[in-house]
Image (spheres, coloured by chain):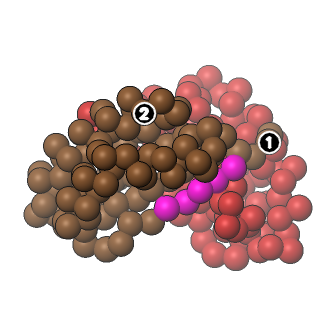
Chain colours: A brown, B red
């Protein structure tokens, strides 16, 4: 399983504008056939810092997600309100 | 629910030394009464970048975790192998 943390940094004055975009992105992504988890969180210290915690079966499923109509339409709209570039961490499970 | 991302950055030559410490920390923490989730991941691009994704009922439960015997014993041992300070993000769920 591939675990992903994706972090967006939105200008404070535009947080209200991105909320419906995130809402649609989360709803549509959760309907993707291979989506295991796609949960969005907000930093308690920074209301413009949005953090996705995702799980996908493999890299191909993540790539397919990034090629969906909803991703290609909504992410550029969200990115227009960024104050700094997004960051991504792709991770493997630690076998405890 | 309180979601937490905690990131450790370990010197590459000491990764092997921290693995058993992480293993014990994960096992003991999952036995804590109020622990909802405590999962450890490794950055695919950086084998010294360890990422905890945690869930707790509230801040008091997280604070109690940080006061346990296993946390107070193991975390300083892990930190001795750090190449840079740990980072923490405390988050609320985005209500989609």
- For discs 2 and 1, the disc positioned in front in the rendered view: 2
Position of residue A13 in the picture relative to residue B20 (left or right): left
The residue lying toward the viewer, choosing from A75 and A51, is A75
> What's the residue at 35%, 72% (across, down)?
A85
Give percent across and percent down for residue B40: 67, 46
Q: CA distance from mark 2 to mark 1?
A: 27 Å
Position of residue A67 in the picture relative to residue A10 (left or right): right
> What's the residue at 42%, 52% (across, down)?
A66
Which residue carries the number 1 mark? A95
Residue A54 inside the magenta-drawn segment: no
Q: Decide: few, some or many residues near mark 1? Use Cα within 10 Å; few <14, some 14-19, many ≥20.
A: few
- Secondary-structure class at tag 2: loop
- Secondary-structure class at tag 1: loop
> What's the residue at 59%, 65% (across, down)?
B86
Kindly indicate whether the residues beneath marks 2 and 1 are on one polypeptide chain.
Answer: yes
Determine the chain carrying the residue at label 1: A
Magenta: main secondary structure: strand
Give percent across and percent down for residue B84: 63, 75
Which residue carries the number 2 mark? A32
Magenta extent = A88-92
């Amino acid at each position: 399983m591939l675990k992903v943390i994706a972090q967006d940094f939105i200008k404070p004055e535009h947080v209200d504008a991105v909320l419906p975009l995130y809402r649609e992105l989360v709803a549509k992504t959760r309907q993707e056939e291979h989506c295991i988890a796609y949960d969005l969180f907000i930093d308690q210290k920074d209301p413009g810092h949005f953090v996705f915690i995702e799980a996908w079966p493999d890299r191909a499923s993540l790539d397919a997600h990034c090629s969906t109509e909803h991703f290609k339409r909504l992410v550029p709209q969200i990115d227009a309100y960024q104050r700094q570039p997004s960051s991504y961490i792709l991770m493997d499970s630690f076998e405890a």
